[in-house]
């Protein structure tokens, strides 16, 4: 009975998230409260259900990014970018690839927060609709996040389970690592983006006129990236390491700006720019996902793999990738991957094969599946939050128009590459 109630509440919540896009945080928090009131999620489980590391990373990066935007560096970068591309179509492709490269080393949510201001500046400069531009940046960030150990939380989970180091993502046990499958998928998305933006042929003509007088926020951004990469090299580091790093650089930035301007107003304006709605939305989602996990919903789904996969490694692999893509379109991939990794390990043991093939397939499906819907990944939520903050209303159709073809080509090609090298 608790499982049925949890499934119904979960489905209703996601339907409301898709319909009432401007009030997603209220929907998620309301669902979380219902899970607590009905006893599906014990109150004692709330502290561990919430991924504090992700929330701290998000908070710290939001502050650093706001200082970065105030420095006018994104506008200058946009002008530089526009000088190197022939039209809007290629400008979007360049921004997407740029965000992908960054997200291979930084959490994809942080990447969106860093690159989206550049996309907004480009859109404003060309007087074009920023919605598809920001969506393209978000989905590209989700894709490349699986390329390295530090690119995404799911990568960290995978590395911990199969004991992979930073370099193992590129070359592992004498074979190409998962990074190459991700990059093949990224390259094949270029034709998809070119087709989606085939009508955006406006010529780009601009000059670099924006002057940046304060380069400290830019160095803080780069410092955040470098420190996260360095921290990833240490095993058994504290769970909140990445979040503390992001918040530490944000605090340095706030103190610096206060000393520089000698006005507390700069602190108020920067903190007011933080997207608290997104933080509350993620908090509610983490609690709901833990609730359906404790109700046995995710375990029940996992058991279906064994029932339908039988003894065929190929069928099991295809099933894991396909179901992961579908579920991750609606379920946050962090708790999903955390739950499914032990299941994948058990399946591999029953089939008598190492866990790497199925584990890599799980990561490919779960990471890319979030690109299908606007609530399937934290980066998508962050991107939409930025657009809403600028006064733009993003419909589900706006997102799926880009997300679905992008996901299909990247997931299929990535899964094929993994099968070729690891089957």
Image (cartoon, grey):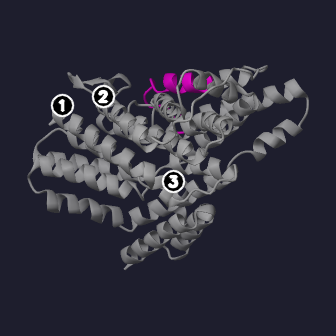
Label whose residue precedes the other's in the sequence (3 or 1): 3
Q: Are marks 3 and 1 in contact (CB under 8 Å)?
A: no
Q: Residues within 10 Å of mark 2 (few under 14, many from 20)?
A: some
Q: Are marks 3 and 2 in contact (CB under 8 Å)?
A: no
Image height of 3 relative to 345, above or below = below
Name the disc covering residue 48, or none.
3
Label whose residue precedes the other's in the sequence (2 or 1): 2
Q: Are marks 2 and 1 in contact (CB under 8 Å)?
A: yes
- Front: mark 3 or 1: 1
User: Between 216 and 7, which is closer to the camera in this rendering?
Assistant: 216
Name the disc covering residue 114, or none.
none
User: Between 277 and 414, which is closer to the camera in this rendering?
Assistant: 414
Q: Residues within 10 Å of mark 1 (few under 14, many from 20)?
A: few
Q: Where's residue 240, x and y in %? A: 55, 39
Is 226 contained in the magenta span? Answer: yes
Q: Where's residue 44, x and y in %? A: 53, 62
Label whose residue precedes the other's in the sequence (3 or 2): 3
Q: Mark 2 falls on what kind of element?
A: helix
- Front: mark 3 or 2: 2
Image height of 413 relative to 338, above or below = above
User: Between 294 and 173, which is closer to the camera in this rendering?
Assistant: 173
Q: Residue at x 17, y 58 (%)?
A: 306
Q: Is residue 210 left or right of residue 185?
A: right
Span highlighted in magenta in the image = 222-241
* Residue position marked by numbered label 2 in the rendering: 180
User: Between 250 and 236, which is closer to the camera in this rendering?
Assistant: 250
């Amino acid at each position: 009975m608790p499982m049925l109630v949890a499934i119904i509440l979960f489905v209703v919540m996601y339907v409301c998230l898709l319909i009432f896009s401007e009030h997603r945080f209220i929907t998620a928090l309301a669902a979380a409260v219902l899970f607590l009131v009905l006893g599906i999620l014990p109150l004692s489980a709330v502290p561990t259900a919430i991924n504090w590391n992700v929330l701290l990373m998000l908070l710290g990066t939001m502050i650093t990014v706001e200082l970065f935007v105030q420095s006018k560096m994104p506008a200058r970068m946009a002008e530089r970018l526009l000088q190197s591309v022939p039209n809007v179509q290629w400008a979007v492709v360049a921004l997407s690839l740029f965000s992908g490269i960054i997200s291979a080393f930084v959490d994809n949510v942080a990447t969106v927060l860093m690159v989206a201001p550049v996309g907004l500046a480009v859109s404003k400069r060309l007087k074009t609709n920023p919605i598809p531009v920001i969506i393209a940046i978000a989905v590209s960030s989700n894709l490349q996040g699986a390329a390295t150990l530090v690119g995404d939380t799911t990568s960290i989970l995978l590395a911990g389970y199969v004991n992979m180091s930073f370099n193992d993502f590129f070359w592992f046990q004498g074979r190409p690592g998962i990074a190459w499958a991700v990059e093949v998928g990224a390259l094949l998305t270029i034709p998809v983006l070119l087709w989606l933006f085939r009508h955006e042929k406006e010529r780009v003509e601009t000059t670099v006129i924006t002057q940046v007088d304060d380069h400290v926020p830019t160095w803080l951004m780069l410092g955040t990236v470098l420190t996260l990469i360095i921290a990833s090299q240490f095993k058994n580091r504290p769970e909140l390491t990445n979040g503390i790093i992001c918040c530490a650089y944000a605090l340095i930035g706030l103190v610096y700006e206060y000393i520089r301007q000698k006005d507390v107003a700069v602190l108020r304006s920067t903190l007011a720019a933080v997207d608290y709605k997104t933080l509350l939305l993620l908090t509610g989602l983490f609690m709901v996902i833990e609730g359906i996990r404790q109700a046995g919903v995710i375990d029940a789904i996992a058991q279906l793999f064994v029932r339908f996969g039988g003894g065929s490694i190929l069928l099991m692999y295809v099933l894991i990738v396909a179901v992961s893509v579908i579920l991750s379109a609606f379920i946050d991939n962090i708790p999903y991957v955390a739950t499914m990794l032990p299941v994948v390990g058990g399946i591999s043991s029953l089939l008598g094969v190492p866990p790497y093939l199925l584990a890599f397939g799980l990561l490919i499906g779960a990471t890319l599946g979030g690109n299908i819907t606007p609530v399937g990944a934290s980066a998508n939520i962050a991107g939409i939050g930025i657009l809403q903050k600028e006064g733009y209303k993003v419909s589900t159709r706006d997102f799926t128009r880009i997300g679905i073809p992008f996901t299909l080509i990247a997931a299929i090609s990535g899964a094929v590459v993994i099968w070729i090298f690891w089957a």
